[in-house]
Amino acid sequence: MRRLILCLAVFLGLAGAISPADDGEEGGVTRVYVLSVEGEVGPSMEAFIDRAIDQAIRGDADVIVLSLDTPGGSVGSLKEIVARIEEAEDEGIRTVAYVLDWGASAGVIMAISCRDVYVRSEATIGAAAPLDAATGEASGEKVVSFFREYAKGRAEKHGRPGNLAKAMVDKDTEVWQVVVNEPDGEKRYYLTPDEIRELFGILGERHHEVEEVKGEDGKIIEVPRVRQSYDQITYTVEGKTVTIAKQINAPGKILTLSAREAVEYGMADGIAENRDELYEKLGISKPREVVLGPTWAEGIVAFLNHPIVAGLLLTIFSACVLIEIYHAPGLGVALVGLAALALFFTSHFVVGTASVLDIALVAIGIVLLMVEIFTPGFGVIGVSGIVLVLLGLVLAFQDFSVPEDSTDWTAVVGNLFRVTVSLAFGVILIGISLRYIPQTGALNRLVSSATMPPSEGYKVARPDEAELLGRTGRVANRLRPAGKVEIGDRLVDVVSRGEWIDVGVEVKVVAIEGPRIVVERIRPPDERA
């Protein structure tokens, strides 16, 4: 579905970078497709790279250069992007990562998944520890373990040190540079203390230390660490000279490398300050470039898919709908909320994370909530509606329905947190609006404050309801905020001004607005003060 939409976008002229006609590789000309990969790794970037690699394959590209400048992002999108890079390599296309400035987190994994890695002199790569989307703290061991081995596999596929990739993910990975004089020359290895012990029988000394770190609650806690040291630098093992050169990453640290270090340690192939220098080092004498970047349409979609913007759209949706229901019926504020929801689903539908099923779940959930609000029951219908709305919105944030591994579960928890906070913030805004909008000049113009006295010919819906104004009664069915109140010998359908009121609480009829009978809780004298 995503590819169909992207193809339609290209057909309608939304895709700005169209490959020029190509007459093949003649006279040593190399077809190079440069993909401008900037910003946060997510569904929008995934969709752009998906389109661009398809275009490169159709254009018989010889080389794909990923011009990278990213702080990282979604692990789910990263896995899909890496799969597309590997697919391009299977088509015989040489893949090159060119890190301009920042190749962090998911960005460094994307880079080392390419056959060649080049960096500018001011570039930095590393710091790929996965973070919990809900808390922003480091993920649990299950997620770290999966991502650690995933990063190692991507690095070793192209002959890069797997342990250095692990150290970029896991702060407990200690790595030493070991130089061995082999018969065919000097070789450098990047090994953990356990590997040094297993391969060469060099034990060294292990020091048990305690490090003070800040816990989740902000308090300082003590964390035990094990530090390795060696009593000498050079050892002779089976006739070979083994030198423990230096410690590359200490326990408790996440590995980050400068451009010079990345090249020295074998995580990058070289430094290039511009693409001309890059092509020279790649041995490309006559590049024929096709530079691809996100189109303006993809830029809009990427903006709407940003977690903050997507959350804001959900906040607007919940706030506007509740204002319409409880405070300004008939004003049309709900249309603004529905427009925000439509933008949310459209942007996520284009990048392929949302589906018709997700939209249907949210629609059914909203209907159930409306039924619960206007025909109060035991809450089962309302709870079912909330569950369906949350489920539909969470699924719209991700490109899978059933989690398959620990990273998927982490994404589910993070998306659930994001959706819940966004909707809850809208409810909080409603609580503020119900209290202050009538007294706020600018917002008061949205809600009519004009009176319609009977002396001017206005009448309420029914004469018997007019007699209820000012009378008191007790709640018979909990007001959420609609419900029933017993006034005298009558059971009357009423609504509060957004407040939930328990059974048995005394209330007073304060307004009759068309078919709505509005009540307020009668507060004790001490509470009024």
Image: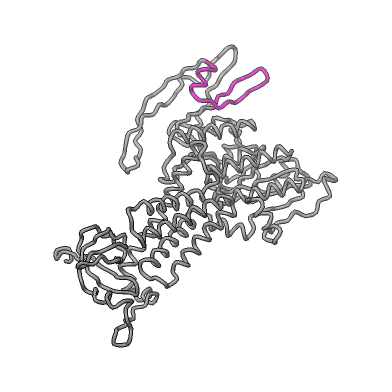
Q: Position of residue 451 (x, y in %)?
A: 31, 81
- At x 37%, y 75%, the residue is 447
- When asked about the image quadrant of residue 179, the answer is top right
Q: With 284 as the anchor, is 267 left or right in this view?
A: left
Residue sticking out furthest to the right: 27
How is the protein colored in the picture? one colour
- When asked about the image quadrant of residue 85, the answer is top right
Q: Is residue 103 visible?
A: no
Confirm whether the magenta stretch covers residue 190.
Answer: yes
Q: Position of residue 279 (x, y in %)?
A: 72, 44
User: In this orientation, which residue lies closer to the viewer: 255 or 438?
Assistant: 438
Q: Position of residue 126 (x, y in %)?
A: 53, 40
User: In this orientation, which residue lies closer to the viewer: 26 or 416?
Assistant: 416
- At x 44%, y 58%, the residue is 367
Q: With 406 as the anchor, is 3 left or right in this view?
A: right
Q: With 258 as the anchor, is 441 left or right in this view?
A: left
Q: From this view, report whether residue 512 is shown above or below residue 181.
A: below
Q: Quadrant of the C terminus?
A: bottom left
Q: With 362 as the anchor, is 280 left or right in this view?
A: right
Q: From this view, report whether residue 187 is shown above or below residue 53.
A: above
Confirm whether the magenta stretch covers residue 94.
Answer: no
- When asked about the image quadrant of residue 164, the answer is top right
Q: Is residue 144 visible?
A: yes
